[in-house]
Image (cartoon, helix red, strand yellow):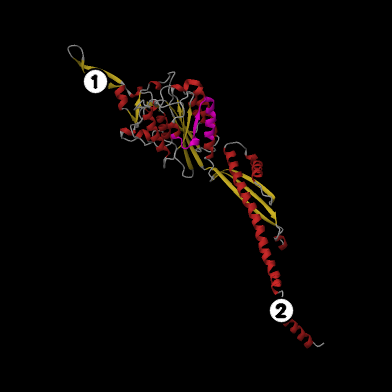
Amino acid sequence: MSGASIFSRVRTAASRFAGADQGNIAVLFAIASVPIISFVGAAIDYSRANAARTAMQAALDSTSLMLAKDLSEGLIKEADVNSKAQTYFNALFHNNDAQSVTVNASYTPQTSMGSTIVVNGSGNIKTDFMKVAGFPKLDFNTSSTSAWGNVRMRVAMALDNTGSMADDGKMPAMQKAAKSLIDQLSGLSKTTGDVYISIVPFAKDVNVGSSFVNANWIDWSEWNGDNGTSTCNTRDWRGNCTSSTWTPDDHSKWTGCVMDRAQPYDTLNTTPTSDTNTKFPAEQYSYCKPGSSAYLQPMLGLSADWTTLKKKIDDMKPTGNTNQSIGLAWAWMTLGTSDPFPAPPKDSNYQYKDAIVLLSDGKNTQNRFSSNQGQIDARQKILCDNAKAPPNNIIIYTVQIDTGGDGQQDVMKYCASSSDKYFYITSPTQTVDAFNNIGTSLSKLRVAK
């Protein structure tokens, strides 16, 4: 057969095939279904890989935060970081598709962010569809970082030193708990300035220490009127003094106690100025006499000398009436960077959290202005509102020790920054647990990311 004849037949057959429509759709669908199925299959494989990665990310985030907490609280050592990371991750990660999963953690004690923990994870899934295209598996990886230490803390402890603290072992229980809190917080301090603590023992007054006798923030007007000698200048024929001169005692006799400031400054942390109302009134409070068996200890401004802080707590003695407000007011003053007890300047490279821990065993009974509990509580609530409000943002914890059946004190609940920061205990033995919980709460503030 000639080539022309073969060509003619082929052309004729091709024309018939082109003109036929029985089965074209099936053939075209079969051809088109290959890339469609491939794309759908790839999407399914990628979706499985993404689900595994998402689950890994969640587990790594929780793992890094728990490691940061453990490290910041000293619960684990640097050498244990990797093994602990694996333990936490295994308990948190549940994805049946993931294969060849590996996790590792690295700890850097100090960076510009503070201390950091980085947890990396990787794995793969076996593909169901993409293996046809030469991809038998899809790899995935992710990481999580937690940082702490760029948040610095300043904590003021206002501790009840009133006479009722002598009952039921409350004073030694409080001393033990307060020292335990110092140990807990000092463990978070990795460099100078990370943690500072002040101690404010209070009764009706606060003892700032007689060494401040020449400070310009002391108001002597009431002290001068209460402490001195009256000399008679003239007498009538019966011998009665008709004219006298009052000579105030030398201020060197002052033993260091101060009363509440004039209102409204009793509820503020305003820096004292030449305005007498902003100054702190000196008082010759009987419980401020050094050497007495009921001596109200002088307060201590912010310090990182843990030994001195604990010695201050050991020296406390129960004495006098209750004025929680003045303890709170001075605790707040110690957190400021100006007189009377200027705190160290704050470094702009760090965030700061300021907190007050108030412990008291009873009702307010006396301040400068009143012996009425309701009136004293009302001033205290204003003080707490001011301290907690922006821009001050002081975090307040309150601990009430009630061994006398007085019930929860509204003012102490009110002053706490939130319900979980108010601790109502009915046994002195619970004091350590309350302070440990406060320490745990404060340590969490050090985790910034």
Classified by dominant secondary structure, the portion drawn in magenta counts as helix
**Residue 331 appears in the figure:** yes
- Which badge, 1 or 2, is on the more N-terminal residue? 2
Provide residue 53's location: percent of width, then percent of height: 63, 52
Tell me if 306 is positioned left or right of 376 in this view. right
Rendered position, 118 above or below 210: below
Q: Residue furthest left?
A: 237
* Residue pictured at 66% horizontal, 51% vertical: 122
Within 10 Å of the Cα at label 2, are there few (<14), some (14-19), or many (20+) other Cα atoms? few
Q: Which stretch did the figure color magenta?
A: 414-439
Q: CA distance from mark 1 to mark 2?
A: 134 Å
Numbered tag placed on residue 20 in the rendering = 2
**Residue 185 appears in the figure:** no
Provide residue 200's location: percent of width, then percent of height: 44, 29
Task: Pick whichever, 241 or 423, lies toward us.
Answer: 423
As shown in the figure, which amino acid type bears the numbered disc 1? Thr
Rendered position, 92 above or below 200: below
In which quadrant will I find the C terminus?
Answer: top right
Within 10 Å of the Cα at label 1, are there few (<14), some (14-19), or many (20+) other Cα atoms? few
